[in-house]
Amino acid sequence: MSALHDRFAGRTLGVASLHGKERVIGPPLVSALSLEGFRAIEGVDTDRFGAFSGEVQRTLDPLSTAIAKAKHGAEVSGMDLIIASEGSFGPYPPSPFISCNEEFLVLLDARDGSTYEFRHLSLNTIFGGEQCSRLKEVEEFAQRMQFPSHGLVFRPSGKWNSGDRVEKGVQDVERMHALATSFISDNGSLWVETDMRAMMNPTRMQVIGETTEHFAKELAMTCPECEQFFFRITGTNAGLPCELCGWPTESIRSYLRTCATCAHSDHEARPDGKMTEEPQYCRNCNP
């Protein structure tokens, strides 16, 4: 039997989430790890580590937050196999006018304290916020954010202050109109933003599912030297040649996989089979 099967087969996975993430996290891992099953952990309070709506500030980085959530899940449930996730949203560094969703997953084996971590960045996101002083502005923002399938959050201003009124999970047109009218009447304007909790944002839920599928595949990768699982991608190598002049570009040419057990590493070609880059991304052709 494989090392992956020896460690995980037949066990039950606890998902440390308040927001329905188990629906997309559980099935890929049950299949990849030969688990007995999965369930959401009752009694977890993942919001204590930070809330997108601002009432609780996240004090740790996203990866550390996911680790803390997983440990909290183990403490609350007494289960020995826990997974937790944490997401971040903001401008995509290479192109700040585009929003991105960065998701972290942490699988904790409480039998020996081992953790397995994974990060995935996606440009597929419905994320934003806007200060509005008229109902029409709220409606236009909601339309851009694919309301009502994607929920909204209302508060007086972009930054939450103690005592501020916050209305989450707005997914009804009548409620949206009533809340917007009330906030504008009381404050002159309101801040409206996407509700980034997974069960309120189908696009984010989809990305979490995709992240888990990628994670499951990485966990199943076996080191060719010691045959341990999670022979994971740990780095990238730039230098994909320009298709016009052959000059090395900044685009990814290959990936580096490394084994945490024996430190063996291998280079792996791009999975999309791309061998050259377009001249517009070449500093020689397009300085």
Image: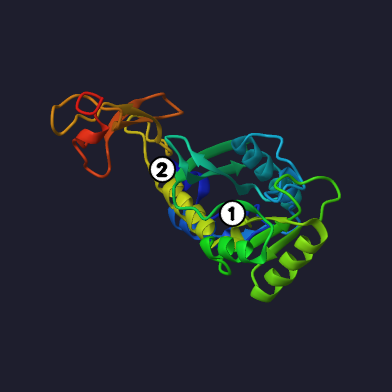
Is residue 179 visible from the viewing direction of this image? Answer: yes
Mark identifier at residue 13: 1
Residue at 49%, 46% (x, y): give it. Answer: 99
Residue at 48%, 58% (x, y): give it. Answer: 206
Q: Earlier in the sequence, mark 2 or mark 1?
A: 1
Q: Position of residue 10 (x, y in %)?
A: 53, 55
Q: Position of residue 227 (x, y in %)?
A: 37, 35
Q: Nearer the viewer, residue 109 or 147?
A: 147
Q: Amino acid at mark 1?
A: Leu
Residue corresponding to mark 2: 218
Mark identifier at residue 98: none
Label 1, residues with CA under 10 Å away: few <14, some 14-19, many ≥20: many
The alpha-carbon separation of the residues under discs 2 and 1 comes to 18 Å
SS state under label 1:
strand
Q: Which quarter shows the C terminus? A: top left
Where 185 falls versus 84 (above or below)? below
Residue 241 lies in quadrant = top left
Is residue 38 visible from the viewing direction of this image? Answer: no
Q: Nearer the viewer, residue 155 or 2?
A: 155
Q: How many marks?
A: 2
Q: Is residue 92 left or right of residue 284?
A: right
Q: Amino acid at mark 2?
A: Glu
Q: Position of residue 282 (x, y in %)?
A: 24, 29
SS state under label 2:
helix
